[in-house]
Image (spheres, rainbow, N blue to C red):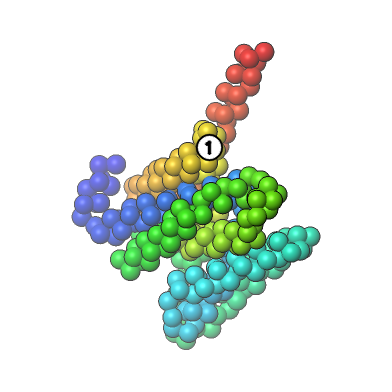
Amino acid sequence: MAEFLVALTNYSFLQHALLAGLLASIAAGVVGTFVVVKRISLISGGIAHSILGGMGIAYYLGLSPTKGAVISAIVAAIIIGLVSLRARQHEDTVIGALWAIGMAVGVLFISRTPGYNVDLMTFLFGNILMVSVEDLILIGALDGIVLLVMVLFYKQFLAVAFDEQHARLRGLPVEFLYLLLLVLIALTVVILIKIVGLILVIALLTLPPAIAQHYAGNLAQMMVLAVGFGLLFNTTGLVVSYQWDLPTGATIVMVAGFAYLLSLIFRNLSFPMSHRQSH
């Protein structure tokens, strides 16, 4: 740990990585809470993996892959959201199709890019150590958009998350709110791609809120705890990967996965005991 702290003061790439982890934790904790509560991780996974198509096309055209990711993420979110709302029986099929097509298109365009030299593994598994100042500005801007929309529509999102039918009876625009939530998920996924890549993004989006759910009394507490857990996992993963020279994205997710399993075991051991005592 001492070695990491010394390196942190000397190397800007570690400082950028730590700041990126903090910014990513904020969006992932807030938006991921709704993903867990509404149980839409499959939809989130479809959005995440379809993004590679937009990144590949942007890279082929000489544009920023991150901008391609933002556009393709929003488009995928709207398509999946509309299918989910209008044709639920085909939802899994459409998600799987977009998932596969997005990945395939991305690989094809990246491989056909003139002077092809991009490391596809960076897109798939991320590289938080390569985050630049420009990346931090973009991540911060996306974070700001996510938080602003969440603050403006928090009560409406809350109603839709827990009682969609009651929200309809109250006259809330449920379909619009659902699509807006998916767009926020799409933007959060783009943020997380820089941290852990496309393959592992859903783990970092869902595991911190899933752990927070074990200890939170309400949705607001769950969000705060999820942000805290996300920051803890990002920082711990960064330290461990630096000390042991491991892939950072995979290490972060491994830390989060072990934490979730330990929390689950602790919860299952504690609750039966308290249940027996109450009887």
Q: Element at badge 1?
A: loop
**Residue at position x 42%, y 50% in the image:** 25
Q: Position of residue 269 (x, y in %)?
A: 59, 24
Q: Is residue 82 left or right of residue 115?
A: right
**Residue 150 position within the rendered picture, expressed as x and y whole percent measured from the top left:** 48, 54
Q: Which amino acid does label 1 sit on?
A: Asn
Residue 264 image-quadrant placement? top right
Circle 1 Cα neighbour tier, 10 Å, few/some/many (<14 / 14–19 / ≥20)? few
Q: In this view, does 177 lie above or below 235?
A: below
The image shows residue 218 at horizontal and vertical percentages of 53, 37
Tell me what residue is drawn at x 28 percent, y 47 percent. Answer: 4
Observer-nearest residue: 260 or 108? 260
Query: Which sits in the foreground, 260 or 43?
Result: 43
Residue beneath the point at 63% across and 44% down = 162
Q: Which image quadrant: the N terminus?
A: top left
Residue placed under numbered mark 1 in the picture: 218
Question: In the rendered image of this protein, does residue 268 appear above or below residue 16?
Answer: above
Residue, far front: 170
Is 140 on the left or on the right of 11, as rendered?
right
Q: Which of the pair 102/248 is nearer the observer?
A: 102
Residue at (61%, 62%) from the top-left corner?
Answer: 176
Image quarter for residue 66? bottom left
Asked whether the viewer can see residue 231, the reply is yes
